[in-house]
DNA sequence: TAGTCGTGGTG
DNA sequence: TCACCAAGACT
């Protein structure tokens, strides 16, 4: 790892901040330093690209302009506002933290990174970002950009996938950060990481800090950052049930924990759980599912495969392959044993649907359309 | 600690 | 189709 003298640190700060003053991105959450604005944007930006966040942020601020309005928001409206952004626990934690600020802090934000981390959904990165940007506290905000940029600049060989590596970077950056303009320093690193120093297709030779970039000067920047690989998503085969009646479609609320908690979806059944012998055909599995629905919920439904491609959806660590099955049921069918309810399509736009549910709904509609 | 938690973009 | 990435937090 490269060590810088105080003179080099000063020169780096000046170079970085001069570049930032001239070339910083004009982003909606950079209009002011309101902690509410900084906070909401930082939460939305977690693992999410800037261009994806912008429209969500603008709509969110119109709908929930203050921390008080967010604290009082209806959860359905909140989830609808977050629909499609993913990592939905962020939205729930956001409202939890809003209530903490309103109730525990009487609407007055804590200003140190340490205090901010006590709020739901605010970890070490976000605490540093809010403290530095909104409250001018000289603390590092170590996100993926900071890891990447400083690993390259200083040839830091520690694996950034390991949690313990964070404190190494925090120590380094806290020594380098501008004490006068910590928020701009942190944001400049992010802009650098999103432009000249991206993960792939970086352009170090035109970077404003190329003279400080040791790995570039040594011609070994592709080594950095050091990061161990992730596991590939595990495939899961499901049947997705599209059951219709005059009362609408049968939707099931997902469990309160796990993936997509509390989301309403077409009922999913793991095909693996229906397999008795390896040689079972899918037709046999469908027949077995019909019997199971009868036995478990007293629902007799004839299921038919929906023509067309199976719906595929990849999460970070799971890959779902869903075979759609359709069937009709009487509106008077007894649902008292079934963990779901009829929902009219007119209600769909008010509900927050996950991407995978939207894909199933779309695939089903396309098939019906092509039939007629 | 390592696994869990979404989605969209890119090569 | 796949691997990997993008302003991480929580358990």
Image (cartoon, coloured by chain):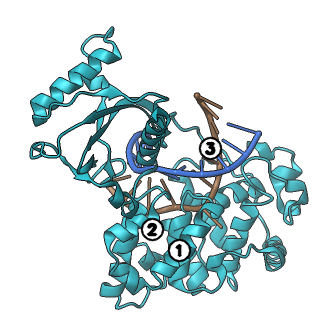
Chain colours: A cyan, B blue, C brown
Residue A150 visible in image: yes
- Tag count in the figure? 3
Instruction: Tell me how far mark 1 sits from mark 3, CA to CA.
Output: 35 Å
Instruction: Tell me how far mark 1 sits from mark 2, CA to CA.
Output: 8 Å
Work out whether A48 lies above or below A309.
below
Same-chain check, marks 1 and 3: yes
Dot 2 or dot 3: first in sequence order is 2
Q: Quadrant of residue A19?
A: bottom right
Chain letter for mark 2, please: A
Check if mark 1's residue and mark 2's residue have beta carbons within 8 Å: yes
Q: Quadrant of residue A173?
A: bottom right
Where disc 2 sits, the SS reads: helix
* Mark nearer the viewer, 2 or 3: 2
Foreground pick, A331 / A169: A331
Q: Position of residue A289 (x, y in %)?
A: 23, 25
Same-chain check, marks 2 and 3: yes
Chain letter for mark 3, please: A
Q: Position of residue A80 (x, y in %)?
A: 41, 65
Residue at the extreme front of the image, as rendered: A372
Q: Which residue is mark 1?
A: A59
Dot 1 or dot 2: first in sequence order is 1
* Mark nearer the viewer, 1 or 3: 1
Q: Which residue is mark 2?
A: A81
Q: Position of residue A151 (x, y in %)?
A: 70, 54
Q: Which residue is mark 3?
A: A227
Where disc 3 sits, the SS reads: loop
């Amino acid at each position: 790892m490269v060590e810088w003298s105080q003179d080099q640190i000063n020169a780096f700060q000046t170079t970085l901040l001069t570049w930032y003053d001239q070339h910083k991105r004009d982003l909606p959450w950079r209009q002011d330093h309101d902690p509410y604005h900084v906070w909401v944007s930082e939460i939305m930006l977690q693992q999410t690209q800037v261009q994806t966040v912008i429209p969500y942020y603008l709509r969110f601020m119109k709908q929930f302009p203050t921390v008080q309005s967010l604290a009082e928001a209806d959860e359905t409206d909140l989830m609808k506002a977050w629909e499609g952004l993913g990592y939905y626990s962020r939205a729930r934690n956001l409202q939890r933290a809003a209530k903490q600020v309103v109730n525990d802090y009487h609407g007055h934000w804590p200003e140190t990174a340490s205090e901010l981390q006590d709020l739901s959904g605010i970890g070490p990165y976000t605490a540093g970002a809010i403290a530095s940007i909104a409250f001018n506290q000289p603390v590092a905000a170590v996100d993926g950009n900071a890891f990447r940029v400083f690993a390259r600049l200083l040839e830091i060989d520690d694996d950034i996938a390991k949690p313990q590596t964070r404190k190494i970077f925090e120590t380094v950056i806290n020594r380098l950060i501008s004490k006068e303009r910590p928020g701009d320093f942190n944001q400049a690193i992010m802009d650098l990481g999103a432009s000249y120093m991206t993960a792939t297709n970086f352009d170090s030779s035109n970077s404003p800090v190329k003279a400080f970039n040791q790995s570039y000067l040594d011609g070994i920047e592709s080594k950095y950052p050091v990061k161990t690989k992730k596991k590939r998503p595990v495939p899961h085969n499901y049947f997705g049930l599209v059951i219709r009646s005059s009362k609408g479609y049968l939707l099931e609320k997902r469990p309160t924990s796990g993936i997509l908690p509390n989301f309403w979806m077409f009922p999913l059944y793991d095909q693996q759980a229906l397999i008795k012998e390896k040689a079972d055909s899918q037709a046999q599995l469908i027949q077995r599912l019909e019997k199971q629905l009868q036995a478990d919920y007293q629902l007799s439904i004839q299921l038919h495969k929906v023509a067309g491609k199976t719906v595929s959806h990849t999460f970070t660590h799971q890959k779902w392959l869903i075979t759609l099955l359709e069937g009709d049921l009487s509106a008077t069918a007894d649902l008292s044993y079934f963990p779901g309810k009829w929902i009219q399509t007119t209600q769909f736009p008010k509900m927050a649907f996950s991407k995978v549910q939207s894909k199933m709904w779309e695939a089903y509609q396309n098939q019906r359309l092509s039939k007629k």
